[in-house]
DNA sequence: GTCAAGCCGATTGTCTGACATTCTTGCAAT
DNA sequence: ATTGCAAGAATGTCAGACAATCGGCTTGAC
């Protein structure tokens, strides 16, 4: 059985660079939901040709980060609350499972990294930088997902979280949400550190439910 | 609350047509795992231009149905057993949940459709057409997933099942697998028909586990 | 005969330019 | 106000081109 090291370095092609840039732009809320993305504008802004841009857009379309309607072009989908709810439900399913598995199998070094990322979030939570809060919180989850022992679980979860990045930024700005989020995450961390699968599952479930509730509040108030 | 009917007709563009055709080709096993897809060949075979093909390939790449390594081009990924296991595990998570929800909320008409699809599979199972078996079985699941009340669950599940289509075809040809699969599916159906959530979950879990075991056998014997 | 180096064809990454089709928008007419 | 039409903008699709890169084959050295 060859380990099949993934040693191949991947040259950064224009396409990949473009996908990453656009994805980040979407995460940071640069484009409003519902707004249309005009190819020619993006081409000049990114300094690339139309074929390259269109390839990148197809990738993002398949990730469900943008929508492409024939003859109307790409746009940022406006997430309905029904779909958002559905995403949170599946996220709960995956995240609870991941936290439970993580509690049973995480290595000491990774546990230290997890603690570090929790501290980073703690620092961000006391500031008002909601982007930093979302980013550090994402780091925290991604460590958990990376240590659940199932790369597919991680991959699917990442895809889903990406689609609700819009809500995450907004709900983090809610009064007190960052602090209560911190408390919930700390409980998840401590359950995992104790190797208590059941507690990790419970804490994780609680956290997602609270996040969903916060998202609903921010949506109702904001629209 | 506007129903927001999806009344917009979507013109069949070359890109979508191409994606569908290639996806079907992959499902039916036309391309061997690990084999490379040469752009120029596909262009002439499909009768389309290279930019259109490349857009389609980017879509399939994002769906993880093909891999694109820079400067080496697209190829069919060879699914390792570790990844396949991971997929089956997540599939179990999703499918069990869907079956349970479906048992509580499916409508009488949809239940009839489900019964019909079960009959269709029964017929296919007694034949030797393994492609028909896979297709009709897929119909059965897709009805369950479509009635679980969560479109995201359905979407993610579809994506995962697509990636193990290779195994599904092979394991269905195993001696007696189609028949035992039929028995398992019938149990799922009857649990759902009875509105028994717990039984539906249990039967569904059993079915996925058996499918995974069959896939493992077919992989070990085939390689 | 084996192994390494280097060359060459094949393939991909990317761009430019073009054109038909379709959508949008503004305006005129009823 | 609503309808219909026309101009402009944007997209879908193609053809062709060229540099960069990869894989295999030949060649040469030992």
Image: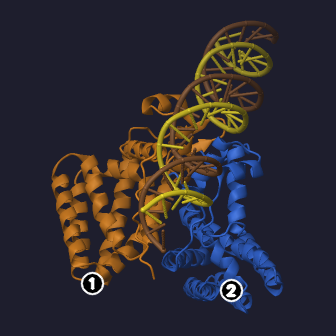
Chain colours: A blue, B orange, C yellow, D brown
Q: Residue at x 46, y 42 (%)?
A: B14
Residue A111, picture quadrant: bottom right
Pick the front one: B104 or A195: B104
- Secondary structure found at label 2: helix
Disc 2 chain ID: A
Residue A106 seen in render:
no
Q: How many labels sit on residues?
A: 2
> What is the x, y in percent for residue B173?
27, 48
- Judged left or right of residue A125, residue B151 is left
State the image coordinates of residue A106 (x, y, percent, origin top left).
65, 72
Quarter-of-image position of residue A35: bottom right
User: Residue at coordinates 66% horizontally, 47% vertically from top-left?
Assistant: A53
Left or right of A81, for residue B20:
left
Residue pictured at 28% horizontal, 78% vertical: B106
The residue beneath circle 1 is B196
How would you rate the neighbour count of disc 2 (Cα within 10 Å): few for under 14, some for 14-19, many for 20 or more? some
D14 to the left or right of B205: right
Q: Which residue is identified by label 2?
A: A190
In the rendered view of the protein, which quadrant contains the N terminus of chain B?
bottom left
Quadrant in which residue A108 is drawn? bottom right
């Amino acid at each position: 059985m060859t380990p099949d090291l993934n040693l191949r370095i991947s040259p950064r092609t224009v396409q990949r660079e473009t996908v990453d840039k656009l994805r980040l732009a979407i995460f940071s809320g640069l484009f409003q939901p519902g707004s249309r993305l005009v190819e020619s504008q993006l081409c000049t802004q990114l300094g690339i040709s139309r074929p390259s841009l269109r390839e990148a857009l197809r990738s993002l379309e398949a990730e469900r980060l943008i929508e492409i309607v024939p003859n109307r072009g790409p746009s940022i989908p406006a997430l309905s609350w029904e779909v958002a709810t559905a995403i949170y439900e599946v996220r709960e399913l995956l995240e609870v499972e991941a936290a439970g598995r993580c509690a049973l199998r995480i290595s000491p070094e990774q546990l230290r990294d997890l603690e570090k990322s929790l501290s980073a979030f703690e620092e961000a939570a006391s500031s008002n930088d909601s982007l930093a809060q979302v980013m550090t919180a994402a780091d925290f989850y991604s460590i958990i997902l990376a240590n659940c022992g199932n790369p597919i679980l991680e991959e699917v979860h990442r895809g889903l979280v990406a689609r609700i990045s819009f809500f995450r930024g907004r709900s983090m700005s809610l009064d007190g949400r960052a602090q209560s989020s911190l408390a919930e995450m700390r409980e998840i961390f401590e359950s995992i550190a104790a190797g208590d699968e059941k507690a990790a599952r419970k804490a994780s479930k609680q956290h997602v439910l609270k996040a969903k509730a916060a998202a609903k509040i921010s949506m109702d108030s904001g629209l």
